[in-house]
Image (cartoon, rainbow, N blue to C red):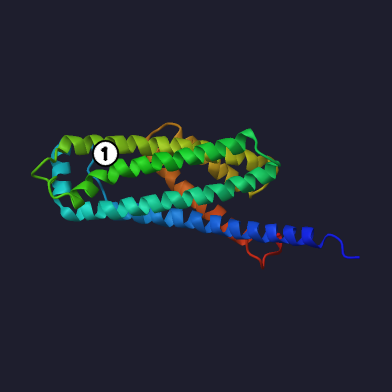
Amino acid sequence: MYVGGPCWTIAVGRVALGGKMRRWSGIAGLVFVASTIVSRAVRGSVPDTDKRNALASFTKFYADKTHNDHALVALVLGFIGLVAFAGFLGGRWSTLRNAEGGPTTPTIIVAVGGTAFVALGMVFHVLSEGLGVTMHFSKGYTIDNGFTPGTALLLASLATGLFLASMLAVGAATAAASVVILRTRALPVWLAWIGIAIAVLCLPVIPPLSFIAAVLLAIWTIIISALMIQAGDPANPEST
């Protein structure tokens, strides 16, 4: 007698689907890192808001039309990267939730912190690149008509604040993920220590430390993404 055929087929289908989703989540993590790096490289160095000649520097910066063109590219790439991070976050949360056996406080913090990072990151890009994008498209708002360096300086300062806030959010997420990793061994333990280091560096809300945390976040994301891609590989016996 043939028993359980449909159930077995459904189970195999779910395993295959789970493997595909893990691979796509891993790929999304790599897209996030690549897009973010290129976005910042294209944007270039924005004038320092703390310098005495900051207003003159911002006027000179936005008078160069290439910087406004770069702002548009940086904005688009930044948005693409953050959408990709959302895909990576979903896969990571699913992995940690399964390791815990269901939703727990740390896994909820991972989801909330990661979502806040995406939202704050998008606002950061709007503030950081919005003025340049406006000057790229607008024929009425130019360096000689409507532009005020004080507004440019204010937007740059607000963007820095949004960056620091977004890093605090993702630091909470990596710290919570580290708790799950340490007690379930769902991922290599040393990844937990990197996650904790990210959180610690973000806590003082000091730009240079947050920048180091951002570099560590990129490394952390790349490694976890590679592990997710490997785990979702049908040729990998551990993927099932």
Q: Residue at x 59, y 45 (%)?
A: 93
Displayed quadrant of residue 225: bottom right
Q: Is residue 51 visible?
A: no
* Viewer-proximal residue among 189 and 106: 106
**Relative image position of residue 149 (x, y in whole percent):** 15, 38
Could you tell me residue 127's position as x and y percent? 29, 40
Does residue 224 appear in the picture of this structure?
yes
Q: Residue furthest right?
A: 1
Identity of the residue drawn at 65% across and 35% down = 104
**Residue 108, picture quadrant:** top right
Front position in the image: 148 or 164: 148
164 relative to 14 in the view: left or right = left
Disc 1, SS: helix
Answer with left or right where residue 46 lies relative to residue 212.
Answer: left
Residue, x 18% and y 48% (percent of image)? 135
Name of the residue lying farthest toward the left = 144
Residue furthest bottom in the image: 235
Q: Is residue 90 above or below residue 226?
A: above
**Residue at the location (63% across, 64% down)?**
233
Q: Is residue 30 above or below residue 122?
A: below
Quadrant location of the C terminus in the rendered image: bottom right
**Residue under label 1:** 156
Relative placement, left or right, of 92 versus 85 is right
Query: Could you tell me residue 50's position as x and y percent?
Result: 23, 35
| Coordinates of residue 45 in the picture (x, y in percent) | 26, 48
Residue neighbourhood size for the residue with mark 1, other residues' Cα within 10 Å, grouped as few (<14), some (14–19), many (≥20):
many
Q: Quadrant of the N terminus?
A: bottom right
Q: How many marks?
A: 1
Amino acid type, residue under disc 1 in the picture = Ala
